[in-house]
Amino acid sequence: MIEDLAELVSAESPSSDPAATAVSAAVVAQLGARLLGSPPQRAGAHLVWSHGPTRVLLLGHHDTVWPVGTLAHWPFQVDGDRATGPGCFDMKAGLVQLFHALATLRSLDGVSVVVSADEEIGSPTSRTLIEHYARTAHAALVCEPSADGALKVARKGAARYHLAITGRAAHAGLAPAAGANAGVELAHQVLAITGLGRGETTVTPTMLTAGTSENSVPAAARVAIDVRSFDDAELTRVHQAVHRLRPAVDGTSLAVRGGVHRPAMPASTAGAALHRLAVEVAEGLGLPAPAAVAVGGASDGNLTAHLGVPTLDGLGPVGGNAHAAGEWVDLRAMPDRAALLAALVARLLGNGG
């Protein structure tokens, strides 16, 4: 499993780099074919293994947030019981566990696996594929990273917006009043955007830019907006509020694009039942019972849950520092997590242990 993880991490795969994800997809396809006994169907850099009508759907992704070249200064390394490297925790170790788990089962009839290449940017091209295989599924198991071993039964939904501000340039020394300062308008909008958050619903201005030179009134500015909520009604409220934003500086104008790309995955009776089954399976294997948590990050599990498919997330590795320097995987936990996943799939298929 460590050797397979090293190979996957060594194939850099930033979501927005088609050449890189194509190479990564080939590495994942080879791993899956070796362990599952058949090559995947390909949809660009997305991979599917389907064994008859879907009863249990397993989801993962091979794209990461790390740009090509990261390995040059941060290669895959093993230090005792820890492995580190870009994308090892989110979520290449989850893919290794997924394939090794399924390789232990007597039959894969009814199992479909979708490994996407654009999850980190909201699954714009893989969503239709995921939803296609989810529609007949009795359960969806998502091999995203765990929360320190806990399984994820609820996730916030997510929306992304880009607010573009158009002003009017002028010389900052000779005629500043002749301009319409897009940077000042940006400041007004950032405060207005921040004020849209409420309770557990967060509205966060993230990337901001303004101006082109130090001695000019900025003619343009923009801000990216990240919205998260456990409540779809809240996502709708914020969506409407973002589109109602109006300029405060004379001579400026606003343009908004974006929207909800992940519906909320609320805790549900169906998801809770899957967690109880996972606890029962873990105890049968002599493993600690995994806790259940709700988290702010979104995943493709939001998509399956939105379709009404019982969904259990966080079945991937134990580790930490997702999306951050030094992300790591607990190697000791990988066989146990794979065993838990294998036994859970077998129970859901009715194939025994």
Image (cartoon, rainbow, N blue to C red):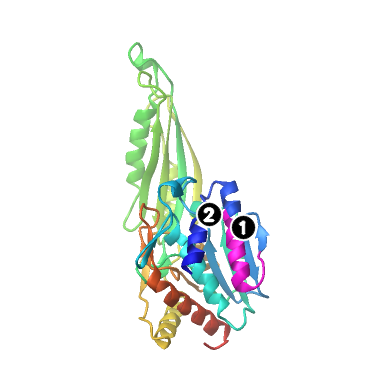
The secondary element bearing badge 1 is classed as helix
Mark 1 / mark 2, whichever is N-terminal: 2
Residue located at (51% from left, 79% from top): 342
Neighbour class for label 2 at 10 Å: few (<14), some, many (≥20)? many
Q: Is residue 347 above or below residue 197?
A: below
Neighbour class for label 1 at 10 Å: few (<14), some, many (≥20)? some
**Residue situated furthest top in the rendering:** 174
Residue 103 position by quadrant: bottom right
Residue 99 x %, y %? 55, 71
Residue 75 x %, y %? 43, 53
Residue 222 x %, y %? 43, 35
Q: Which residue is mark 2?
A: 11
User: Are discs 1 and 2 less than 8 Å apart at CB?
Assistant: yes
Judge by depth and name the residue closer to the eye, 229 or 327: 327
Q: Which residue is mark 1?
A: 26
Per the image, is 314 magenta?
A: no
Callout 1 amino acid: Ala
Callout 2 amino acid: Ala
Label number found at residue 63? none
Residue 101 showing in the rendered view:
yes
| Magenta stretch, residue numbers | 24-40
Per the image, is 30 magenta?
A: yes
